[in-house]
Structures are given as structure tokens and as C-alpha cells.
Amino acid sequence: MTTETTHIYPIFDRMLNREDKESLLRQHSVMIWFTGLSGSGKSTIAIALERELQKRGLLCRILDGDNIRSGINNNLGFSEEDRVENIRRIAEIGKLFVDTGIITIAAFISPNNDLREMAARIIGPDDFMEIYVSTPIEECERRDVKGLYAKARRGEIKNFTGISAPFEAPAHPALSLDTSRLSLEESVAQLLQLILPKVLPAGQK
């Protein structure tokens, strides 16, 4: 009687890696991380950018408050500790998407450099493109259809970034976009100029 074990399932030499995924998708992945005040235009630009990239045959995934806070992070509040954990989880999810070859677009206030630097470390600095939507707070308040800024100024919302909690502007973003001065089309055009050389394979550039 043989003691040799017969393996029912084959064991592969290695799992498919990021380069395999990128080759399949014919693109290079990256994290495009939008930061800025509430109402600055982050999500609007992210959605428009995704559409333009898809038109070029590039697969993207947007991560924002609607699909993160309502799901995987629905147990988190807005304390300092929960804000850190919120961004940490987002970065870990983003890293999985980037490692799968997908161009990932994150749109979060992420109000200080420590948070954004943590996200960059998790994802990898070479894959992290910080985009600062630098729209002035006066314009953000003017656009505020939900009345969040007014509630914050009345003290009805605590720790509201820009009013009762600080926002720390990025020191060296890859790009700054002031949507009080730039149209949506102009903002997306600047982004495409920055992003396409990084995500398109050499033969498509």
C-alpha cells in the first residue's frame, strides 16, 4: 500500500498577478484620489472622468460615500477614530481594485495630509494620484442643496469639515482643480491629459 498522497486538485505554480490582469484589460491601473470640501465637485468630476475613460475602453471603479458609507463602512461614525478607519478601509479596498488592474477613482473629503498619506502608503505611492478639488468654501456653501453648511454653522452638525473641523489642503497634489473657475469639461480635460499617459499601454499612447 502506497503512502503517497494523490492530489485531487492541481496546485498551480502561482496565482495570476497584477500584470496578468492589466494585460487582459489592456490598461495600467492607478488610484485617482479626489480630495476637497463637501460640495467642491469631487463626485461630479469623478463620474464625468469615469465616463470619458470608459469611452476609451478603460475599465474603472468609483469609490465614494454612497457606496462605502452605506455598505462596508456603515458601522462607522464621524469621530476622529472612525474617520481614520473609514479611509483605511477605503484604501485597502482601493488596493485590491488596483491590484486587479482596474483604474480606481476615490472621491472623499479625506481632510488632512496624515489620512491621505496613510492611503498612499497602503495603495503604494507610485499608484496614488492625489487630485485636489480646490473650490473655495464660499462656492461650496452656495451650491449646498442639502443645507449641510447652514446646519453646521448653526451647530446642528458637529465636526463638519470646513466649519467646525479643519481641512488641510494637499501640499503637492498631482493636480489642483478649482471648479468655481473651471468648467466640468475643462476639469476632465486636464485630468485626461494627466492620467492617460499613465494608464494606456505603450502602443496606445
Image: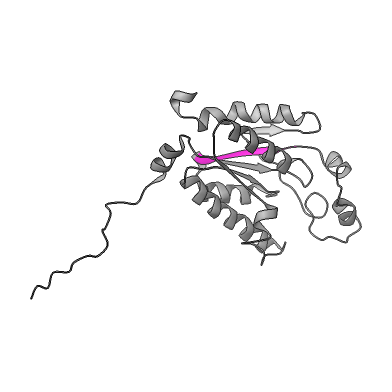
Position of 129 with respect to 39 (left or right) is left
Q: Nearer the viewer, residue 172 or 74?
A: 74
Within the image, what quadrant is residue 89 found in?
Answer: bottom right
Q: Nearer the viewer, residue 167 or 182?
A: 182
**Residue occupying image coordinates x 68% and y 59%:** 69
Which residue is the extreme one toward the bottom? 1
Asked if the stretch drawn in magenta spans residue 129, the answer is: yes
Which residue is the extreme one toward the left? 1
Asked if the stretch drawn in magenta spans residue 20, the answer is: no
Of the 4 image quadrants, the one containing the N terminus is bottom left
Within the image, what quadrant is residue 71 found in?
Answer: bottom right
Q: Is residue 52 above or below residue 63?
A: above
The picture places residue 43, in percent across and down from the top left corner, at: 71, 43
Position of 114 with respect to 98 (left or right) is right
Question: Does the image show residue 171?
Answer: no
- Main SS of the magenta part reads strand
Question: What is the number of callouts on the image?
Answer: 0
**Residue occupying image coordinates x 60% and y 32%:** 55
Question: Does the image show residue 93?
Answer: yes
Magenta span of residues = 127-134
Position of 120 with respect to 148 (left or right) is left
**Residue occupying image coordinates x 59% and y 28%:** 194
Say how the picture is coloured. Answer: one colour
